[in-house]
Image (cartoon, coloured by chain):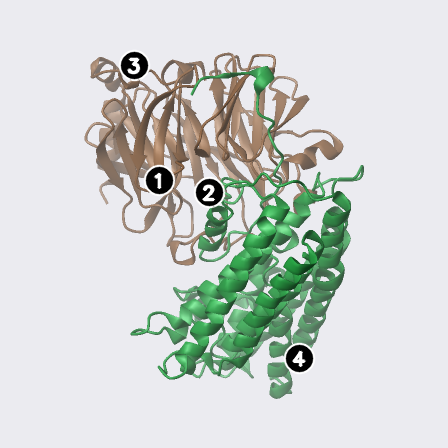
Chain colours: A brown, B green
């Protein structure tokens, strides 16, 4: 394929893109100024992408054709890309100001989406996490032009099962390679648990090569969701594929170039409250805390992002979504609950919407720049 | 939706470990999430009743059934150990005995069965796209030496391991002779791997998961904080197991009236399809009976009557399933067995879900 040509085009325009994109079109204010977006199931059984304001109001509610997983938010324009639940083959680019579908992304032959994606800092490119299910070496990161929505390139993700990716620096993409081989012909069956090797990989967007990869010490810890603090520190949540009562740490911190993952776990029996399953990771808005959520455990655990010390467990049934909100955090759950935490971890407010929040929350606009 | 002051916050309820494995197809887990519906406002059952349900399930069903499975798989491994095969009839009988034992636990897909993907490594099914065939053809074409090294064989695709792989290798008319040469070594490797996997499964149940379920809600609780949580896992296993038999063991081969799909029947090569469905109904009935302490006597009798009928109708259906579903004159008997199981499942849900105060597990069941 013409990957080398495409990559040159992609790289040549990356440096020029900032000015052009910043000038174009309306911002997130045009979509009601949401601080977060998330996918949800409605009481009718239909699915929707919902924008939430800082006050817990619905800024918008846009129908989705099926169950979502996570949404990627454009840094400036009020655009969200909602990916179908794994193993989905399409993503919808939704104009959250008009509620219209601006474009439909289809994964190429031999690929499917994992449910997460990320925009470049300038909003010029969209990176999508993809399973290259008939190839043995690694997953793929698809590169899409965020104006024409054409696919311009793809890069190896550095591991099997690239579940989530985010910008770790101006030209560095952090990738959570969950390590689990699946094939759409076998549904979501896990085909390689005996040999899985998850990692947190960093992919250079200038060379298209993985420049670093940190593996969890235990290979059954499927590292598949990540978050970034503005200074570049990455938090990673892991799902343990062994017996739940033997689960090791499910939250890790890492900085590109720093070597091994730093593992965070609650002491003694408290750790078991996560049920062996880390669903999302997030930093608080002020960056002092890192959280891991567990829908299986019905609990989140909060840690000091500097010392790594365990701070507290917060019980909340089916909690999974987590994102920075103000100086603190916002947590969402499958029973419709929302919980805002302050900088000191105190619960500022809760709300109950008559929806089932799907797995992940995404901070947008100003809230995202805090992150 | 306005914010609610913290003081008025709704009490967040614990709902640990929906813990359903994402098995091949995956749809059943999601379907269960939807089927549980909105939470009820029923009163909680006393903890001693919840513990009694858990204890019955462990002592009457789960622990003995897993011990039987690992013993059967040990005998299978021994029968398959030599190449060329010395006693082919003995090997076939050991395969059938192991599959029979697997049907006693195949619906228990949480905890130790989910860990390390064991349930799929024991029986990779449903497999509508022929994943097992591709995986086995690949090993045979390459004469992959992983068959001679248990550690390496443990790492090959789950689709090439377990009982469904043996169904192809030992009983497919097109398969090469499994009694000698490479296919024989492959059968031996699968036997050894099954013995190891089922032994680990039995050990995890006996040494960690069963004790964890028993101490739920006590000072010693680790995995299950409340006494109701293991009961929820058992209930989810009961409903999901029933759905798998309804949709796949019966529904797969039934297909449509104009287009039955006999090749979707479970283990049809070894002629086990109907036997598996019957054994599954029996195992589900025995698990359902463990919930009797949650119900008034009349309801418990009503529940068991529904399961007894599902068992009787399944036992009456004529085999082999692959032929019965193609014959308009006998097909109805399979449809009747499927419907009786649907009825039993619905009665289980209607009687037990309110008693157990179930809530939705939208994300916990998704597992992604």
Per the image, label 4 sits on a secondary structure element best described as: helix
Identify which residue is drawn at 79% across, 39% down.
B218
In this view, the residue farthest toward the right is B219
Q: Classify 10 Å Cα crowding around label 3: few (below 14), some (14-19), many (20 and above).
A: some
> What distance separates the C-alpha of mark 1 from that of mark 4?
53 Å
The numbered mark 3 sits on a residue in which chain? A
Per the image, label 1 sits on a secondary structure element best described as: loop
Q: Is residue B107 above or below residue A215?
A: below
Left or right, A84 with reference to B286 = left
**Residue B64 location (% of width, % of height):** 74, 65
Q: From where the camera sits, is residue B157 visible? A: no
Left or right, A112 with reference to A101 = right
Task: From the viewer's side, name the closer residue of A205 and B212.
Answer: B212
> What distance separates the C-alpha of mark 3 from that of mark 4?
71 Å
> What distance separates the C-alpha of mark 2 from that of mark 3?
38 Å
Q: Which residue is mark 4?
A: B79
Of tags 4 and 2, the one toward the viewer is 4
Q: Is residue B130 above or below residue A302?
A: below
**Residue A283 location (% of width, % of height):** 53, 21
> What distance separates the C-alpha of mark 4 from that of mark 2?
39 Å
Task: From the viewer's side, name the closer residue of A236 and A169.
Answer: A236
Q: Which residue is mark 3?
A: A29
Per the image, label 3 sits on a secondary structure element best described as: helix
The numbered mark 1 sits on a residue in which chain? A
Q: From where the camera sits, is residue A101 visible? A: yes
Q: Which residue is mark 2?
A: A159
Q: Quadrant of residue A117?
A: top left
Q: Which residue is mark 1?
A: A46
Q: Which mark is residue A20?
A: none
Marked residue nearer the N-terminal end (1 or 2): 1
């Amino acid at each position: 394929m013409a990957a080398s040509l495409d990559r040159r085009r992609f790289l040549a325009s990356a440096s020029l893109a900032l000015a052009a994109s910043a000038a174009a079109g309306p911002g997130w204010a045009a979509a009601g100024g949401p601080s977060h977006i998330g996918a949800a199931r409605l009481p009718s059984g239909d699915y929707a992408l919902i924008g939430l304001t800082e006050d817990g109001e619905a800024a918008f509610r846009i129908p989705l054709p099926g169950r979502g997983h996570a949404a990627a938010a454009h840094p400036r324009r009020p655009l969200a890309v909602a990916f179908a639940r794994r193993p989905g083959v399409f993503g919808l680019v939704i104009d959250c100001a008009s509620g219209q579908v601006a474009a439909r992304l289809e994964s190429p032959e031999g690929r499917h989406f994992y449910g997460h994606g990320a925009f470049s800092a300038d909003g010029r490119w969209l990176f999508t996490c993809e399973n290259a299910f008939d190839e043995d070496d690694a997953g793929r990161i698809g590169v899409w032009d965020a104006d024409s929505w054409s696919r311009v390139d793809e890069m190896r993700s550095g591991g099997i099962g690239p579940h989530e990716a985010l910008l770790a620096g101006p030209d560095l993409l952090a990738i959570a390679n969950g390590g689990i081989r699946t094939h759409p012909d076998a549904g979501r069956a896990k085909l390689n648990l005996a040999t899985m090797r998850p990692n947190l990989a960093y992919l250079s967007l200038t060379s298209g090569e993985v420049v670093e990869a940190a593996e969890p010490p235990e290979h059954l810890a499927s590292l598949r969701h990540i978050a970034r603090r503005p200074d570049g520190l990455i938090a990673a949540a892991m799902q343990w594929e062994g017996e739940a009562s033997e689960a090791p740490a499910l939250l890790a911190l890492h900085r590109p170039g720093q070597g091994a993952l730093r593992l965070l776990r609650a002491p003694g029996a408290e750790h078991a409250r996560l049920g062996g399953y880390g669903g999302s990771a997030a930093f608080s808005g002020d960056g002092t805390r890192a959280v891991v959520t567990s829908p299986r455990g019905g609990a989140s655990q909060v840690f000091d992002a500097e010392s790594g010390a365990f701070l507290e467990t917060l019980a909340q049934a089916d909690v999974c979504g987590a994102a920075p909100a103000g100086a603190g955090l916002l947590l969402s759950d499958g029973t419709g609950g929302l919980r805002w935490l302050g900088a000191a971890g105190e619960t500022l407010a809760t709300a109950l919407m008559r929806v089932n929040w799907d797995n992940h929350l995404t901070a947008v606009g100003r809230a995202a720049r805090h992150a | 939706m306005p914010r609610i002051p913290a003081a008025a916050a709704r009490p967040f309820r614990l709902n640990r470990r929906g813990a359903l494995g994402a098995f091949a197809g995956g749809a059943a887990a999601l379907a269960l999430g939807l089927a549980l519906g909105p939470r009820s406002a029923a009163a909680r059952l006393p903890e001693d009743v919840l513990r009694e349900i858990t204890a019955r399930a462990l002592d009457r069903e789960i622990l003995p059934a897993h011990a039987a499975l690992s013993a059967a798989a040990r005998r299978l491994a021994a029968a398959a150990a030599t190449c060329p095969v010395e006693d082919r009839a003995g090997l076939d009988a050991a395969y059938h005995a192991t599959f029979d034992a697997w049907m006693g636990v195949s619906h228990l897909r949480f905890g130790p069965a989910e860990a390390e993907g064991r349930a799929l490594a024991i029986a990779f099914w449903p497999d509508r796209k022929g994943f097992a065939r591709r995986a086995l053809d690949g090993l045979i074409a390459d004469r992959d030496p992983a068959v001679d090294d248990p550690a390496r064989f443990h790492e090959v695709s789950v689709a090439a391991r377990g009982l469904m792989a043996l169904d192809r290798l030992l009983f497919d008319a097109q398969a090469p002779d499994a009694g000698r040469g490479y296919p024989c070594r492959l059968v031996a490797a699968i036997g050894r791997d099954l013995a190891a996997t089922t032994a680990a499964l039995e050990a995890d149940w006996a040494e960690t998961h069963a004790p964890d379920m028993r101490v739920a809600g006590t000072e010693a609780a680790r995995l299950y904080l409340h006494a109701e949580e293991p009961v929820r896992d058992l209930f989810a296993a009961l409903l999901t197991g029933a759905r798998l038999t309804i949709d796949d063991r019966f529904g797969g081969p039934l297909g449509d009236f104009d287009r039955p799909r006999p090749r979707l029947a479970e283990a049809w090569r070894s002629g086990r399809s109907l036997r598996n469905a019957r054994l599954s109904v029996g195992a589900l009935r025995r698990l359902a009976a463990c919930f009797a302490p949650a119900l008034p006597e009349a309801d418990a009798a009503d529940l068991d009557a529904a399961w007894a009928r599902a068992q009787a109708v399944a036992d009456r259906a004529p085999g082999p399933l692959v032929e019965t579903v193609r014959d308009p004159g006998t097909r109805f008997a399979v449809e009747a067995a499927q419907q009786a199981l649907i009825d039993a499942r619905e009665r289980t849900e209607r009687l037990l879900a309110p008693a157990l105060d179930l809530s939705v597990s939208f994300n916990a069941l998704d597992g992604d």
